[in-house]
Amino acid sequence: MRYILKYKKRFFIVIPLMVILSCIEEIPLESDGFEEALVIEGTVTNEVKHHEIRLSKVFAIDSTGPKPLTGANVSLSGNKEYVFEEAEPGVYISLDSFAAQPAIEYELNILVNNKEYKSQSMQLPGNSKIGKLQANRIDYGGENGVAVTLNNQNIDQTANYYRYEYVETFKFNSNYKKVKDLIIVNEEPIEVPKQKEEYTCYQTNKSQEIILANTNSLSEDAVNNLLIKFISSDSPILSNRYSILVKQYVISREAYTYYEILEELSGLENVFTQSQPGFFAGNISNINKPEEKVIGYFDISSVSTKRVYFNYEDFYDANSIKPRFVSFAQCEVTTPSTSTLIAQLEQGIVRWSGVTPTGAFMVVPTRCVDCTVFGSNKKPEFWED
């Protein structure tokens, strides 16, 4: 089986002496630094939902990240006009739920601070569904672990360019399951029943990588064995049960080229959250001042999703030592004096572990018994055990 790693780097724009661009299409790159730029993030899909556009301002000399851009009038023109309302600073949600339709030209329109911005006209591309999403234990890059790979089913021969995102959720346990807590009453530590669920938790993370696939130059018009996620065997992500939801976007050739250049120039963090020593244009511009810096790419895309689950025991010996956030060696049991114990409890750094024959309280570091240090004790609605 062939595993392909596609674009697992973070976004960051740098100033290269020379950039070898894709033969598909060239996007202009400017090497001059800039004071500020409008950042527009948004993709409208063929899913019936309330779609989202994000607006912010980023500054070359500001490394603290983008600042939400408020007070904008945002709309999408197509078979009708769709109006977006600001739901929170910089986040604009369509008032109506809708799905992009084939053969319709869509344009994003933004009016803010007496400036008018417009995207290029975009159409919904072809459609392609995820055929198989599977997990296998492999050796990859000198490491052993579990690889999540994807194969798609090409329904429309015009679907040649793909972008992928995922949301991973995993279930895990704390090192120890304790039945009691310690609280302070009248300046004395006392035992009480456990106040909340702290043994079983869940953590959810969104993908940060650029993951692309292009079948335009392949003899077979399909994506085969595309590596979406590789998880090392020593990662606590694998310790109990894992699920990943993968979203496949069929995108335009121009959008593919845009993200491909982002990958080529990537090095550190997300392009939308770091200072920008360089700049290249997307498909959105100020209609009265085309030279103004605008970052981002507005796209119309068809979408397919698929989820897969697997357990630790599916690939590893159930009796082996499972990877954890905290090693057992870091979970030393101590018996502090009353004054020290009160101070530690007030700081939240220890939890109940037991009582000595003499009645002294034993404690361990909080991270060893409280899984909410690393995740949420609320079971996701979609979760299947």
Image (cartoon, rainbow, N blue to C red):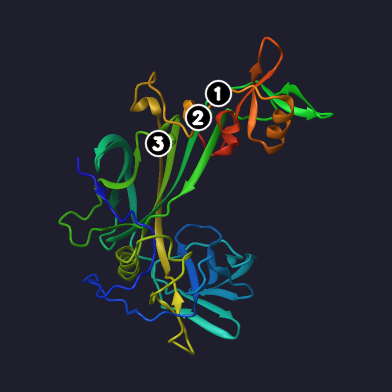
Rendered view: 345 above or below 206: above
Which sits in the foreground, 86 or 22? Answer: 22
> Residue beneath label 2, please?
330
Label 1 sits on a secondary structure element that is: loop
Rendered view: 238 above or below 277: above
**Amino acid under label 1?**
Tyr
- Of the two numbered discs 2 and 1 on the same chain, state the one appearing first in sequence: 1
124 left or right of 175? left
Q: Decide: marks 2, 3 in contact (CB < 8 A)? A: no
Label 2 sits on a secondary structure element that is: helix
> Residue pushed farthest top?
357
Q: What is the quadrant of residue 150 in the picture?
A: top left
Label 3 sits on a secondary structure element that is: loop
- How far apart, in angstroms, are the residues tagged by discs 3 and 1? 18 Å
Which sits in the foreground, 285 or 93? Answer: 285
- Of the two numbered discs 3 and 1 on the same chain, state the one appearing first in sequence: 1
In the rendered structure, find residue 13 and report the number of the disc placed on it. Answer: none
**Amino acid under label 2?**
Gln
> Residue beneath label 1, please?
176
- How far apart, in angstroms, are the residues tagged by discs 2 and 3? 17 Å
Which sits in the foreground, 47 or 167? Answer: 167
> Residue beneath label 3, please?
235
The residue that appears at 46% across and 64% down in the rendered structure is 43
The residue that appears at 64% across and 31% down in the rendered structure is 350
